[in-house]
Image (cartoon, rainbow, N blue to C red):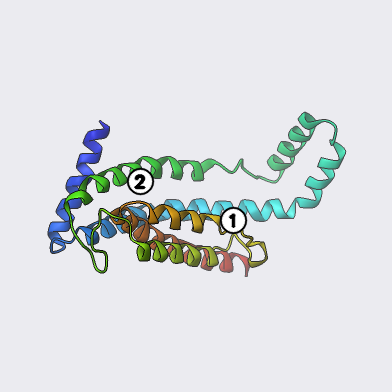
């Protein structure tokens, strides 16, 4: 079943490349954009729900602190009191649509990566990249730059809260793309551009809700 899924994606990539003047690199980017744009309503809704939950938790911070102090010696009572407070204010567990989005994206991404890994061995160059089967430093830097832009536009991360720890995913994405085939890096690039779009749309939505 998994092999059929990967082979189907590989065939789709080959067909896209044929339509795009034989460019496998463009085919990978087109596939990444198509998949992420198709999932954009779901991922945007999950991000908005996360922002709403974050705001509610921030408003409840004083009450949460009092509960922590009151039940300092009884973790079970503390947990029960927190859950009761969350239910009272309509705060979900934080999984919900976010977990559903992750469950949908994970196998899709794994299948696409496997298909690209199969395909790049037999294809050549793309733009400045001499061989899509090998890593490319400039592509890794471009993916990291997109990650930084997405982070800057993320309304769920206030500027004062941006510590080195929050920039860690950007560094990890750079290191990963720098050590995998450039064909896979192009998928990251296409996907990252939609993440920037998502954060811009979420930023606009947050401003309208806060006005």
User: Which residue is rendered at x = 45% and y = 62% of the image?
Assistant: 144
Would you place residue 186 above or below residue 8 in this image?
A: below
- Does dot 2 land on a helix, a strand or a loop? helix
**At which x and y percent is residue 23?**
18, 61
Q: Are marks 2 and 1 in contact (CB under 8 Å)?
A: no
Relative side of 178 to 89, left or right: left
Q: For this rendering, which residue is in front, 146 or 46?
A: 146
Would you place residue 135 above or below residue 138 in this image?
A: above
The picture quadrant where one finds residue 161 is bottom right
Relative side of 55 to 116, left or right: right
User: Which residue is rendered at x = 36% and y = 60% of the image?
Assistant: 189
Relative side of 96 to 111, left or right: right
Q: Earlier in the sequence, mark 2 or mark 1?
A: 1
Quadrant of the image for the C terminus?
bottom right
User: Which residue is rendered at x = 39% and y = 45% of the image?
Assistant: 105
**Which of pointers 2 and 1 indicates the residue nearer the eye?**
2
Q: For this rendering, which residue is in front, 18 or 54?
A: 18
- Does dot 1 land on a helix, a strand or a loop? helix
Quadrant of the image for the N terminus?
top left
**At which x and y percent is residue 124?**
18, 58
Tag of residue 51: 1
**At which x and y percent is residue 21?**
13, 64
Tag of residue 32: none
Q: CA distance from mark 2 to mark 1?
A: 25 Å
Mark 1, Cα crowd under 10 Å, few <14 / some 14-19 / many 20+, is some
Q: For this rendering, which residue is in front, 106 or 38?
A: 106
**At which x and y percent is residue 128?**
26, 69
Q: Which residue is mark 2?
A: 109
Relative side of 64 to 32, left or right: right
The picture quadrant where one finds residue 19 is bottom left
The picture quadrant where one finds residue 131 is bottom left
Q: For this rendering, which residue is in front, 168 or 94?
A: 168
């Amino acid at each position: 079943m998994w092999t059929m899924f990967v082979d189907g994606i590989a065939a789709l990539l080959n067909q896209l490349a044929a339509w795009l003047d034989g460019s496998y690199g463009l085919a990978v980017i087109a596939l990444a954009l198509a998949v992420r744009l198709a999932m954009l309503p779901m991922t945007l809704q999950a991000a908005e729900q996360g922002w709403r939950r974050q705001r509610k938790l921030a408003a409840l911070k004083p009450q949460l602190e009092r509960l922590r102090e009151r039940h300092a010696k009884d973790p079970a009572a503390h947990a029960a009191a927190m859950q009761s407070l969350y239910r009272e204010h309509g705060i979900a567990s934080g999984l919900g649509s976010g977990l559903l989005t992750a469950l949908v994206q994970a196998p899709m991404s794994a299948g696409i990566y496997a298909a690209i890994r199969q395909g790049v061995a037999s294809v050549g160059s793309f733009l400045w990249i001499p061989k899509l089967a090998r890593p490319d430093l400039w592509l890794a830097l471009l993916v990291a730059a997109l990650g930084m832009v997405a982070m800057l536009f993320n309304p769920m991360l206030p500027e004062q809260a941006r510590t080195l720890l929050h920039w860690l995913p950007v560094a990890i994405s750079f290191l990963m793309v720098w050590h995998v085939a450039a064909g896979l890096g192009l998928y990251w690039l296409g996907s990252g551009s939609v993440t920037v779009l998502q954060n811009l749309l979420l930023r606009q939505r947050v401003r309208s809700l806060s006005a």
